[in-house]
Amino acid sequence: MSIFDQLVIPPTAHHTDLLNIFLVFSMLLFVPYACVLLGASFLSVYFKREGSKRKNSIYLRFSHDILDKLVVKLSVGIGVVIVPVFSITFVYAQLLYNAQVISVSILLLSSILFTAGIILLARFKNSMNLENVFSSIKNIVPEKNKLPENVKSIEAEVKSSISQNGITSLIVLIFAVFLYTGAVSIAENPAKWDSVTNILGFLISPDTWINFGLFITSAFSITSASILFLFFRWNGGLKNMTEEYRQYVTSFSVITAFVSTLLIPLFLIIKFLITPEVALSKGVFIYSGLALISLLLVCNFFYAIIRNSEVKWSSAAFLVLIIAFTFIIIKDQVTLANALKKHLVVVNHVADSIENVKFPKNVKVAEVSGEELFTTKCSACHKFNEKLTGPPYDVTVPKYNGDVKKLAAYIYNPVKIDPGYPAMPNQGVTMKEAEAVAQFLIDKVKQDTGK
Ligand code: HEC
């Protein structure tokens, strides 16, 4: 983690609170849409393959519509996935400042993979669109054999790049998600920081697999909920759907949505059971509870769609599902904050001391008081008008003619002067203190004797 520790400044306690809020917002953007991208690329690749194999036009159209509706423009992908995932990585780097934990490097790797996956997915979508252009051309040209040779060869090229881009983007996204879920689950469990030191460690860590399973089921749940919502409700839904197509899409999506949404609580409960005690708190209970209730409500909506084959509930299902995701994300952040409490006490302390060096608080440096110094360090041997162990000031101080520097130099480092007295022991004062007390003596003698 040494690269990060050099780049990253440790957060102060106040800064830590801000980071936690920022983390929740980044995740609210990132998690749902990353889920949709994963689910959409899986379903699209799957239906494309099956459709081509079985020459099933419903599958082929479904594959195309999923990409078209769910995978938005690259620029949006950058805004809601790539920027947030890099921000999440950076927040983790700050929260995990100086911790010997692999999470931050893995999150960085995962961010890079997400970027690659999204670019590949955009290419997959483009080549699908190109393929459609070729189909339209064929519809216009009555005799297909009359298509020029080069058009045919470009078509073949596009076709092969479709399946390649689709499958690679899917694999890259799955890896990205796996690493992300592994990195996040390790961070939540400080007891494992020392033992899990490489990707292999993730593979054998049950926490990672539970988190991964949760992500995958969430992906299917939110993807199929989005299909129902975007195909049938949003802006009046898709145009030109045949009854057969409509029925297939509805029944496939709602059953997938229902089953996967029912599985989410299962993963949540297992995750709850394996969460280390340090990471649990009232907040974790409350948000888990709220998430479970909203998920059950969502399942109810899906069930209503299955029973009445009425898609009108899909808007409500979609909305409540997003709310459930919000609760899960907040719960995860509360868990993380609890788990890092001990670690952050140290980090905040380091941060505070760095801050104090950089921006010294305007605490007035206590003025060195000459009178006080005299009372504590000198009065045992000196009076102003009487001889004690040392000579009276009223006699010795006027020799200095008001020269503070010269008198201070003597007080700072006394030398032998009067044979009638023993040497004055060094009083161990600083030059500043010596100057203060010298000034005090000069002023006082002048006041008392006029000299
Ligand atoms: C342990 C006793 C002792 C203490 C404490 C002590 N002094 Fe002295 N001081 C002496 C003695 C003895 C002399 C005479 C030394 C000599 O003439 O060589 C002296 C001499 C001086 C002189 C006269 C120097 C000169 O030019 O003749 C000054 C001024 C002075 N002390 C200031 C201080 C101040 C200020 C402090 C406190 C920070 C202090 N002393 C604490 C014993 C003490």
Image (spheres, helix red, strand yellow):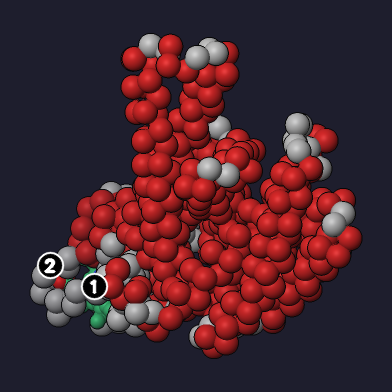
Mark 1–mark 2 Cα distance, whole angstroms, equals: 14 Å
Total numbered circles: 2
- Horizontally, is 111 left or right of 409 in the view? right
User: Label 1: which residue?
Assistant: 428
Q: At x 17% / y 68%, what residue is drawn? A: 414
- Horizontally, is 375 left or right of 428 in the view? right
Classify mark 2 as within 8 Å of ligand 1 or not, answering yes or no: yes
Q: At x 78% / y 72%, what residue is drawn? A: 296
Q: Amino acid at mark 1?
A: Gly
In the image, 263 versus 360, the foreground residue is 263
Question: Taking the image as drawn, is residue 10 in sight?
Answer: no
User: Label 2: which residue?
Assistant: 415
- Horizontally, is 8 left or right of 257 in the view? left
Measured as percent of width and height from the top left, residue 229 is found at 76, 47
Q: Amino acid at mark 2?
A: Val
Measured as percent of width and height from the top left, residue 22 is found at 58, 53
Measured as percent of width and height from the top left, residue 384 is found at 38, 70
- Viewer-nearest of labels 1 and 2? 1
Q: At x 64% / y 72%, what residue is drawn? A: 264
Image quarter of residue 102: bottom left
Q: Residues within 10 Å of mark 1 (few under 14, many from 20)?
A: few
Image quarter of residue 240: top right
In the image, 210 versus 89, the foreground residue is 210
In the image, 290 versus 379, the foreground residue is 290
- Whichever of labels 1 and 2 marks the residue nearer the N terminus, that label is 2
Q: Residues within 10 Å of mark 2 (few under 14, many from 20)?
A: few
Question: Taking the image as drawn, is residue 265 in sight?
Answer: yes
Instruction: Please identify the quadrant where the N terminus is shown.
Output: bottom left
Against 42, is 212 above or below? Answer: below
